Image: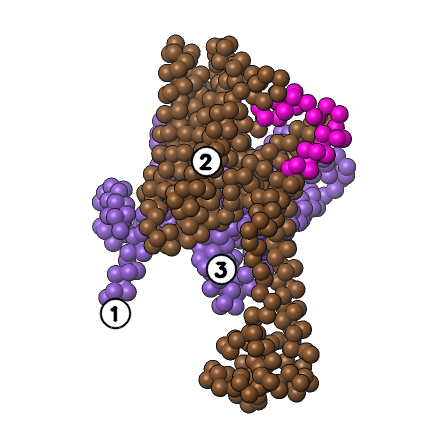
Amino acid sequence: MSLDSKSAAPAHPTPGHHRPSALASFLKLRELPVILALVVLVAVTAALNPLFLSEQGIKDLLLNATILMILAVGQTLVIITRNIDLSVGSILGLVAFGTGSIFVAAPNLPIIAVFVVGMLFGAVLGALNGLLITIAKVPALVITLGTLYIFRGINNAWAGGTQYFAGDRPEAFGNLSVDTVLGFPVITLIAVVVVAIVAVYMMGTRPGRDLYAIGSDPDAAGLFGIPVTRRVLLAFVVNGLLAGLAGVLYASRFNSVGATTGSGLELDVVAAAVVGGVAIFGGSGTVVGAAIGALLLTTITSALTALRVDKFWQQAIVGILILAAVVIDRIASVRSARKLRMAEARNV
Amino acid sequence: MSDRLDAQPGPATGSGSSVQPERDQPETGAPTKGTRMAAPGTRTSEEKTARRPAAGKADTTKVLAVPKGRTGAARILLGRDAIMIYVLVVVVLYASLVIPRFASPVTVGFLLLDVIPTLLIALPMTLVIISGEIDLSVASIAGLTSALMGVLWQGGMPIALVLVICVLAGLVAGAFNGVLIAYLGLPSLAVTIGTLALFRGLALVVIGDNAVANFPPGLTSFFTSKIGGTGIPTVMVGVVVLIIAFAVVLHFTPFGRGLFALGYSKEAATFVGIDVARSKFLLYLATGTVSAFAGIYWTLRYSSARSDNASGLELAVIAAVLLGGVSIFGGKGSIPGVLAGVLLIGTINYALKLDRVSEVVLIIVTGSLLILSVVAPNIGAAVQRARHARQVRAAPLP
C-alpha cells in the first residue's frame, strides 16, 4: 500500500494549526474543503476589489450560480446511485425552448402553469432515460450519451433557426431573475428551496438513504429488499424534473433561447458535483456539497474578471480545481479506510 | 436433503416419468422453490430428479436447455463485429444505389477526410474502454496541440520541430492523465473531466482568441491530397498503419489480451501477473499521443490553429466506439468492430448530408443508433432468458 503513505503526506500541509484528530474530522466533512475554497476565493477577491461584494456583485454571483446549482442537485441524486446523466444540457435546452414557445402560443397562461409544464416535460424526458436504463439494464453513460444527441436533435428540429427573445415573454416572468427578496434574487431563492428540500429528503427519509445504499452496492441493496429499479428510476425522474425547472429559469434569466441552448452544459454539471465532493462511483456525497461546488465554479469566473486576471486562465483553473477535488476525495477515503481497518484490527 | 437426492435416482430413473404427472403439476410454476420446500415431506424432489437424468443430481431445476456458445466460423460470421460490418456494407450499398452522387471518388475522399480525427482517437479509446477506464480529455489534448502548433509556428520555429514538440506535448498530457489514474488510483471519469477543462484551458492560455492560418501551403495541401484518382486521402496511409498497429497490439499480443482481463476483473488480472498500473499508464500515453496526431491533422486540414479546435469530439468518439461493440464496463470489444462503428456513423452522416437531410436528423440518428446498439442485444438476451425459463417450466409436464 504505497499509496497510503504517498497520499497521507499531502494531507497535512492544509491549515497548519489543527490537531491531527481535528484535521481528520475536518477532512471527513466532504463539503468543508469546497466551502473553504469558496470563502478564500471570495475573501481574496473582495480584499483586492471591494466592488466584488457590492450589492449588485453578490446578486450577480448568485444569479450566475442558480441554474448550475439546480442541475448539480439533480445530477447528484443520479451519481449517488452509481449512474450518470449526460443529457441534462439537452433537456434544459428543450425545456427552455419549450417555455419560449408556450409564451408565444399562450401569452396569458399563468406563470406557475408554465413552471409546472416545464418541470413535467423535464420529468418525462428524465423518465425516458430512467426507463431505458432500468428496464433494458444498459449503463447510464451510454444511454444518456445517446439521449444527449436525440434530445439535442429534437430541439434542433423543433427550433430550427427560431430564437425567442426577452420581448417574447411576459414581463413578470423575466422579472423573476431581476427582482430580489431581502437582497436575494427570486430565482436563487427557488434554487435554495430546491437544495433544502432535496437535502432533507436525502438525509431524513428512507428512500433518500436507499439511494446511498444502491450506490454503495447495487446487488447488496437489492438483496436487502430495497426496490433498486424504482429508486433509480425516481432519481432520473427527479433529475429530469430539476433540469426542466432549470430550463424554465434559464428562459427567464437569459435573453434568448434557441436550438443550441444548454449544449456542453453536461460536463459543467458533472464537474460541479465532483468539485462538491460527490464520489463519481456512487454511494457518497451531498446535494449541499454539489450546490456549493456549482457556486464555486461560477464564482471563479466573476472573481477572475474582478481581479482582472486574463480570462483565458479561467478554464484551466476550473480543471485544476476538479483535479484537486478528486485528490482530496481520494485522500479522505484512503484515510477513513485505514482508520476502519485499524479499528477492526483492535476489535479482533 | 442432498444425500436423499443422491440415494434415490437409481431406482426412480426407470419408472418416474410415467407415474407422477399430476402430482408435479401444482409446483411447476415455481420449480426451484417447490422442489426445495416439498422435499422433506413428499417424494417430489426425487421424482423430479429422476425424470431428468441429464440434469444430474444436485440442482434439478436450472440445467435444461443450456444456451449453446457459438464456435469456429459461426462465431466470426454471427458475432457483434460481423453484424456491424454487415450493417455498414448495407448502408454503403443502399446509399450508392439511392443517392446519385454517393458512389464517387469525391465522396470517398471527403468522407474519409471527415472521419479521420474520430477514427484516430477511437483506436486508443477502444483500448482504454476495454481496460475498464475512459478518457474524456482527448479532444482537449487535440485542441492544446493545435494551439501550440499555431503559436510555435507563428513564433518562427521550423515546422518539423513544431510537429515534434506537439507530439511531445500530447505525450506529456497523456502521461499526466496516466499518472493520476494508474499510479494514484483516481477514477478516470473524474480525472479526465478535470483534464478536459485543464487542457482546453491551457490551449486558451497559449493562443487566446487568435487563430493562426499561414501554415506552409505544401504541408496543408499534402494533408488534403488524395492518392491518384481513388479519392483516398494520402494521410490515410498513416492512419491505416496506426489501425494495424493498434489491432495487432490489442488482438495478438499478451499486453492486448491482458487489457481484456483487466477490464473484466482487475483483481484477476493482477493475479495472472498483469502489471495493471503500467498497462493503464501506457494506454493513456497512447491516447495522449494519438490525440496530438488528431490535433495536428485537424490544424493542417482546416489550415487553422485555434483553441477550440475539435471541441466536443470526445463524445462523438465515445459514441462511435460504443456503437462499435465495446462494452462501457470493459472486457469486451475489438478494433474491426470499432472501425465499422466509426465508418458507419461517418457514412450515414455523409449520405444524409448528400441527400440534403438536415444536421438535425444526423444528430438524432447518431443517438438512436447508439441506444439501439446497446439496448437491442439486451432485449435479445432477455427474450432468450424468457424462452429458457418457459422451457424449464414446461419441461416437467409429459
Q: CA distance from mark 2 to mark 3?
A: 35 Å
Viewport quadrant of the C terminus of chain B:
bottom right
Tell me, yes or no, if residue A89 can be seen here: no
Query: Which residue is at a point 62% across and 31% down the rendered structure image?
Result: B346
Mark before the other along the chain sequence, 1 or 3? 3
The vertical placement of A193 against A106, above or below, is below
**Mark 1, residue position:** A348
Kind of residue indicated by mark 3: Pro
Depth-wise, is mark 2 or mark 3 nearer the camera?
A: 2
Q: Is residue A16 left or right of residue B198?
A: left
Kind of residue indicated by mark 2: Phe
The vertical placement of A274 against B195, above or below, is below
**Mark 3, residue position:** A218
Residue B213 lies, in percent from the top left, at 50, 13
| Chain A: drawing colour | purple
Magenta residues, start to end: B88-114
Q: Secondary structure at mark 2?
A: helix
Q: Which numbered marker is on residue B246?
A: 2
The chain ID associated with circle 3 is A
Tell me, yes or no, if residue B6 can be seen here: yes
Query: Which residue is at a point 33% across and 38% down the rendered structure image?
Result: B179
Kind of residue indicated by mark 1: Val
> Which quadrant would residue B85 be assigned to in this image?
top right
Q: Residue A148 magenta-drawn?
A: no
Instruction: Give the chain letter for brown.
Output: B
> Is the residue at mark 1 from the same chain as the one at mark 3?
yes
